[in-house]
Image: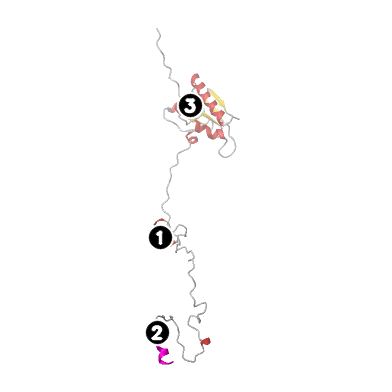
Amino acid sequence: MREDERALWALVARDVAPLRQVRRLPPGADTRQVETSRDRQTPADVPSPPLRRAMQPDQPEKAGAGGQDMGAAVTMEQLLAAGFSGVPGPSVRVALVPASADRIGQRQPGVDDYNWRRFSQGGMRADLRLDLHGMVAQDAFRRLMEFLDVAARRGARCVEIITGLGSGQEGGVLRRELPLWLERPEIRPRILGLAYPHVGNKGSVRVLLRRRKISSKAGA
């Protein structure tokens, strides 16, 4: 290259930026046989694009309020860190309230020894009887209220209400419902005690009623 050609080339190339990572070849080299380091990379060497991280129990992907994962499983280490010892605590005893049927045969306040023995052992005759066999619960309750009103007007001391044994271990519907009805606030104040006529027969209940106080007015 002549001197004037070099000066012209320098003037043209002064504003051209060189290519990065361009490998200079020696004079006379065959450019078809030359590969760059990028061309020689195998598929295993080429970094893959970022993938969505798989969900792991101890590596939550989404966190709820307070940074706690809402969907990942809780590990035993996390439970121990939270204060869970894995040892069951002491058992808690719950006091059960006795059912209304359990009060049948128990002496209640207001009954003296003599009358309670007569009543609970079958020595007191029933003044009136009510048979609820074959009735639905609603009709049976209505008849019970009417029966107690009649017994109070007649001054009955002891009455008997028959429900039958029914089927099953707990008996029929009326047998289960009668003790609950007798504990209702509109009925309970009328009653002094409850007992079965016989120990082996729970298909009827004897009821010891309070006597009505009769007020007498002095007439002229």
Q: Helix or strand or loop: what does disc 1 sit on?
A: helix
Residue to which mark 1 is pinned: 80
Name the amino acid type tagged 3. Leu
**Residue bearing mark 3:** 208
Residue 104: x, y in percent? 49, 33
Q: Are marks 2 and 1 in contact (CB under 8 Å)?
A: no
Tag 3 secondary structure = strand
Is there a contact, CB below 8 Å, between mark 3 and mark 1? no
**Which is nearer the eye, 122 or 190?**
190
- What residue is drawn where x is 40% and y is 84%? 11
As drawn, the label of residue 11 is 2
Q: Nearer the viewer, mark 2 or mark 1?
A: 2
Residue neighbourhood size for the residue with mark 1, other residues' Cα within 10 Å, grouped as few (<14), some (14–19), many (≥20):
few
Q: Does residue 133 sit above or below 48 in this rendering?
A: above
Label 3 and label 2: CA atoms lie apart by 130 Å
Residue 201, can we see it?
Answer: no
Tag 3 and tag 2, C-beta contact below 8 Å: no
Measured in 3D between alpha carbons, the distance from the residue under mark 3 to the one under mark 1, in whole angstroms, is 61 Å
